[in-house]
Amino acid sequence: MELNADFKERVVVHSDQLEWIASPMPGVDRRMLDRIGGEVARATTIVRYAPNSKFSAHTHTGGEEFIVLDGVFQDEHGDFPEGTYVRNPPTTSHTPGSEQGCTIFVKLWQFDMDDRDQFRKTMAEELGDFTDGVATALLHHDDREVVTYSHVNAGATLTNADAGGIEMLVIAGSLEQGGETLGKGAWLRLPMGQPLTTVAGRDGAKVWVKTGHLPHAKPPVV
């Protein structure tokens, strides 16, 4: 399966408008944003766990990165409440689920295969001071990518001109980009060489941004 697999094109998906698609596990549904591959895929997805649902135990051969958007995600390593950012690199394993239900934004098979840096962060606790209406947290950086989380005040401008492509998820509020309003749940991917310029709406915005990673995009190794 290929979905939004042309990384030379600007892509916007208003994920809140998509239908939920059942996964192979009962109670776990998905909204697919981009994908290369079948059930094993380089994928970017919104995943919803119904209360008391869980996925079977598995190893992340290609790594997993996720944000808890609402509720509490759980596995044998602990509870991960709303606002948590998690990186589970290649070779890590777990049995994910949620007693109360949750929604996560997750990226699979997008790691350096030698990465072994596993961690979790509460994104809001990492924020720096506001400058020109924007406060930003550096969540992760390496030779391949930079991952940030920002709070943007109403009317403030968020820009990014990093090389290697730009990806953004609007977690709350709204932004204007390219003449389009990107509200909660909107996912934007800009190709290499195209800078990001956005202006926050009247309620401001909370956004997750990843840059530098598109040159490394490839199908999973199975």
Image (spheres, grey):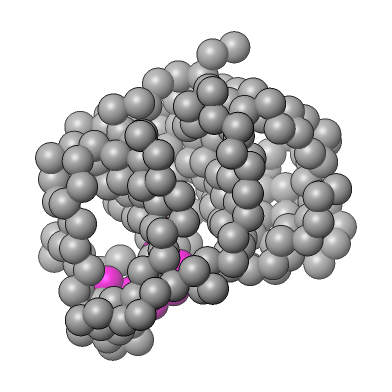
Q: Can residue 28 be seen in this view?
A: yes
Specify whether 97 is left or right of 166: right
Residue 174 magenta-drawn? yes
> As rendered, which of 68 and 52 lies closer to the eye?
68
Residue at horizontal 41 percent and vertical 65 percent from the top = 137
Residue at horizontal 28 percent and vertical 27 percent from the top = 215
Q: In this view, does 173 lie above or below 16?
A: below
> Which segment did they paint magenta?
169-175
The spot of residue 74 in percent (x, y) is: 79, 55
Residue at horizontal 63 percent and vertical 42 percent from the top = 118
Q: Is residue 50 visible?
A: no
The spot of residue 72 in percent (x, y) is: 73, 65
On the rendered image, what quadrant is the C terminus found in? top right
> As rendered, which of 131 and 26 lies closer to the eye?
131
The spot of residue 89 in percent (x, y) is: 60, 34
* Predominant secondary structure, magenta span: strand
Q: In this view, does 32 lie above or below 51?
A: above
Residue at horizontal 13 percent and vertical 40 percent from the top = 193
In the displayed orientation, state which residue is furthest to the top: 222
Q: Is residue 101 above or below residue 25?
A: below
